[in-house]
Every structure is written in structure tokens, then in C-alpha cells.
Image (spheres, rainbow, N blue to C red):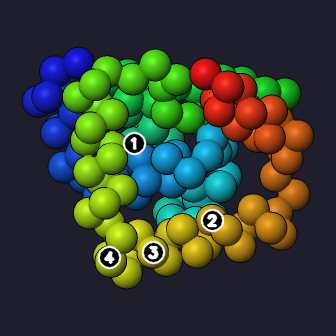
Amino acid sequence: MDLIQIYQCFCDRTRLRILNLLAQSPLCVCHFQEVLGEPQVKISKHLGYLKERDMVVAERQQNWMIYSLPRKRAPELEANLKCLQDCVQNDPVFKRDLKALAKLRSSCCEPAGILASLESRRAGS
């Protein structure tokens, strides 16, 4: 994977927020809308941008399109995702996103079985 491609994806705050959330678990567009407080069209546009560059993958599960980080990641992508995780620890926006995600996951009518099965498959890889 080309470093320029990675950094082009990283140069937008919304895409960074999406990648940071996906580092926690697979999510559907409605989750991003709720956590980021952004319209569906903006979220979909950024997810499409990331997908075209192999930064995220999408899998249809019943009525939901579930996005996740690729199971097999190029070393350059893995290193930069780890760096992102380290760098956002004290950023209030990213901290708020993670808090909102935790709240959403505990109270949402998410496709729970679907996300749980994707998470377990991801952990087994």
C-alpha cells in the first residue's frame, strides 16, 4: 500500500474519526451518523473514498452495509492506524466519539448478532 494513499485518507478529520471508530469494531452507516453527528451522504462519501483506497471493506448483512478495517492490512496501514490510535488519546473530539460509540452500543437496536459475529471472525483472523 502506498504511503501517499494512506496520508491522503488521513488528511481529513471525518475520515480519521471513521477509521478511529472502525479500530474499535465494525459499524454500519447509521452508527457513524449517530456518533459523528453527520448526514448519511457525507458519511457514505467518506466511506466510499476509504473503500476505493482499500482502507475499509464493506459487507452486506441483511439490511445493513457493515464497514470494517481490512482483516489483512499492509504493514504501512497497520503502523499508521496504530499511530492514529496513539495520537488521538487526548483529543476531545475523538474521546467524545468513543464515548458516544460505547453509549450507542449499550443502548442501540444495532444489528447486534451481525456485529458480534463479524467481531468474532475479525478477532479469529
- Give the alpha-carbon distance from disc 3 to disc 1, as whole Å: 20 Å
The location of residue 42, given as percent across then percent down, is: 44, 50
Using the rendered image of the protein, determine whether residue 65 is visible from the camera's viewpoint: no
Q: Which residue lies furthest to the bottom in this view?
A: 92
Label 1: state its secondary structure.
helix
Q: Which of the two discs, 3 and 1, labels the residue nearer the N terminus?
A: 1
Relative vertical location of residue 111 with respect to residue 59 in this rendering, above or below: below
Q: Quadrant of the C terminus?
A: top right
Q: Residue 95 carries which label?
A: 3
Do the residues bearing badges 3 and 2 touch, measured as CB atoms within 8 Å? no
Residue type pointed to by label 1: His
Q: In this view, does 32 lie to the left or right of 87?
A: right
Question: Which residue does the image show at 85% across and 47% down from the upper left?
Answer: 112
Do the residues bearing badges 1 and 4 touch, measured as CB atoms within 8 Å? no
Question: Which residue does the image show at 82% across and 52% down from the upper left?
Answer: 110
The location of residue 4, given as percent across then percent down, is: 11, 30
Label 3: state its secondary structure.
helix
Relative vertical location of residue 117 with respect to residue 87 in this rendering, above or below: above
Q: In this view, does 12 lie to the left or right of 57?
A: left
- Give the alpha-carbon distance from disc 1 to disc 2, as whole Å: 18 Å
**Crowd tier of the residue under label 4, counting other residues whose Cα lies within 10 Å: few below 14, some 14–19, many 20 or above:** few
Residue type pointed to by label 2: Leu
Residue type pointed to by label 3: Lys
Q: Residue 101 carries which label?
A: 2
Question: Which residue does the image show at 39% across and 42% down from the upper left?
Answer: 46
The location of residue 26, given as percent across then percent down, is: 63, 41
Name the residue beneath numbered marker 1: 46
The mark closer to the camera, 1 or 2, is: 2
- Give the alpha-carbon distance from disc 3 to disc 2, as whole Å: 10 Å
Do the residues bearing badges 3 and 4 touch, measured as CB atoms within 8 Å? yes
**Crowd tier of the residue under label 3, counting other residues whose Cα lies within 10 Å: few below 14, some 14–19, many 20 or above:** few
